[in-house]
Amino acid sequence: MNIQPLGDRVLVKPLEAEEKTKGGILIPDTAKEKPQEGEIVAVGKGRLQGDKVMPLEVKTGDKVLYGKYSGTEIRARDGEEYLILKEEDILAIVK
């Protein structure tokens, strides 16, 4: 994968949506909700604050929660789907 986000943006690989409910009911593709959790694959250099570049709080490999309709969906050359988000669209790091 040759995608490098710029500035305060991050590249996220969304986790797969749940296939079953906790009760064991299978969820059809048309009823699945958009995932809100993913793993950071790449990060930009940081956000510009005045004349300084401030590093991002997140790093490659972090699992994060983000808003349901945040970011821009892209498809890489290898067919994988990713999301490009600004750091401010990330709600939390999952530990």
Image: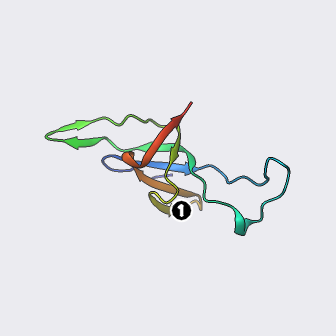
What amino acid is found at the position of numbered circle 1 in the picture? Arg
Q: Residue furthest right?
A: 24
What residue lies at 42% left-to-right and 52% top-to-bottom? Answer: 85
Q: Residue furthest top?
A: 95
Q: Which residue is mark 1?
A: 77
Q: How many marks?
A: 1
* Residue closest to the eye, 57 or 32: 32
Q: Point out residue 7 in the picture as x, y percentages from the top left corner.
A: 30, 47
Tag 1's secondary structure?
Answer: loop
Please state which of residues 70 and 55 is positioned toward the viewer in this rendering. 70
Using the image, determine if residue 30 lies above or below residue 7: below
Q: Looking at this rendering, what residue extends furthest in the front direction?
A: 23
- Give the residue at the far left of this rendering: 51
Q: Position of residue 82 (x, y in %)?
A: 53, 56
Residue for point 52% across, 56% down = 68
Coloration of the structure image: rainbow
Residue located at (71% from left, 66% from top)? 31
Q: Is residue 23 left or right of residue 54?
A: right
| Left or right, residue 26 beside residue 57 | right
Q: Position of residue 89 (x, y in %)?
A: 41, 49
Task: Check the picture and name the quadrant holding the C terminus.
Answer: top right
5 relative position to 31: left or right: left
Residue 47 sits in quarter? top left
**Are there few (<14), some (14-19), or many (20+) residues within 10 Å of tag 1?**
few
Q: Residue at the location (37% across, 46% down)? A: 88
